[in-house]
Amino acid sequence: MANLPHRRPPFRPDAIVPTPRHVLRKRRTRRSRRHARRPFTGRSLPTRSLPRPNSTFRTCPSRGAMVAPTTPPFGPRRHQRRCRAQRHPQRTPGGYRRPASPSTLPQSRPRAQRPSFRPSWQPHPSHTVVDPCGRQSLPPSVVAPHPTAARPQLRQRPPATTCALRRPARTRGAAVTWLHSEIVTRQRWDEHVWSLTLRHRGETHRPGQWTNLALGVGEARLRRPYSIASAVGEPLEFLLAKVNGGALSPQLHALQEGDRVWVEEGAYGWFVLDDVPTSQCLWLFATGTGLGPFMAMLRSPKALQRFKNVVLVHGVRRAAQLAYREQLCTMQRATAPAAGARNAAGMRFHYLPLVTRERAVGTLAGRITARLRDGSLERATHATLSPQHAHVMLCGNPAMVAETSALLKQRGMRKHRRRRPGHITTETYW
């Protein structure tokens, strides 16, 4: 039978023309873009983009989509569900999982009956989300955050079994208890430096901590922090300095014995010996009233029995400002080699006063940093200031603390921290 022009010619295998490679490449690109993974924004889907390489997904050999490796890539409806699970991770948080039996397959429902997206976060009622396009303000329930799968999940630290802080931190806005304490003694060291001893019945403190003193100024109560210079269990004592033009120190300077001052109940601060690592020699550098916390430590000898030598370097402008000088010299003589080499606590104490603006008998001239550079402090005490044998505590003028810390870092010392022990512990006064 002759071939008619309106009929298809018979099939012959040798007449098949292979499809060019560039045509096949374009087809694969279209299919991959059709089923590409796209993040869900809550209102509209972004433009289609090429699939990103991901180690947890592989390319579907039949349609070019990114599918889970545990799911066989056959079946049109299953393929659509896979793509939907990848595009909307919030709607399918567990991803695509093969059902146990065909009866458990979810039935397709109209779009109006499908569950709407519900964000996992609850916005504040007063918050208003503004439309990026600037058309109108949308309620928070309309704008959804980014998918959870696209955000990095931070590992939460398990709760600690024991509290690392020895005293709970005071929260902002918490009630503060004030005690009206009476001034028992007032010791004048200089026209600008003096000390007050109070009859106070409050909580105990640790040597090196501070508390607040306050006075009523009009209807308000003006307060300032001051370091405690007394030992634990003794009446509170403070070493104070008058600041010209200050708000509280001139009024405290005018108080006499028998007057009363407000004292906050409780002590604060971590400039204490409990956090200082044990070393062969403990160096204490102070300027002015920075001697206060060190006096509380020296009056508690049990806290210093871990150290073989303790060196106190106190720098002032004039010799009259050397507070507690007689008491410190008595402690030095009690631990001198001629008196039995050590005291009852097993510690040898060295006291080095420095005066900068005048010459005084029994003192060194110059600043602490100058005497530290030329080695005068080490020669006077026969102690080594090195990272292997010493720990340094600095208190007082911020300029002295910064310059001395820089000199100590040149010797290989570093700042002491709880999680990274070092050799320098500091506290500045302003």
Image (cartoon, rainbow, N blue to C red):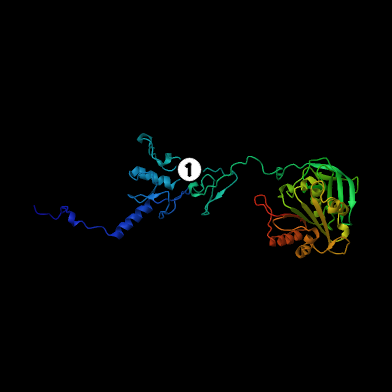
Q: Quadrant of residue 267?
A: top right
Residue at x 86%, y 46% (from the top left corner): 197
Left or right placement of residue 2 versus residue 223 in this view? left
Q: Residue at x 39, y 50 (%)?
A: 58
Is residue 308 shown above or below 412? Answer: above
Tell how many labels. Answer: 1
Residue 393 in picture, x, y percent from top left: 75, 54
Where residue 332 appears, as percent x and y from the top left, is: 84, 53
- Residue 165 location (% of width, % of height): 69, 44
From the viewer's perspective, is 320 left or right of 82?
right
Which residue does the numbered mark 1 point to in the structure image?
Answer: 117
Whether residue 222 is visible, yes or no, is no
Q: Quadrant of the C terminus?
A: bottom right
Instruction: Kindly tell me whether residue 330 is visible in this rendering.
Output: yes
Q: Nearer the viewer, residue 430 or 294?
A: 294
Query: How far across and how far down the image is residue 261, in percent?
Result: 85, 46
> Label 1 sits on what residue type?
Phe
Relative to 263, is 101 on the left or the right?
left
Return the residue found at the far left: 1
The one of 42 and 149 positioned closer to us in this rendering: 149
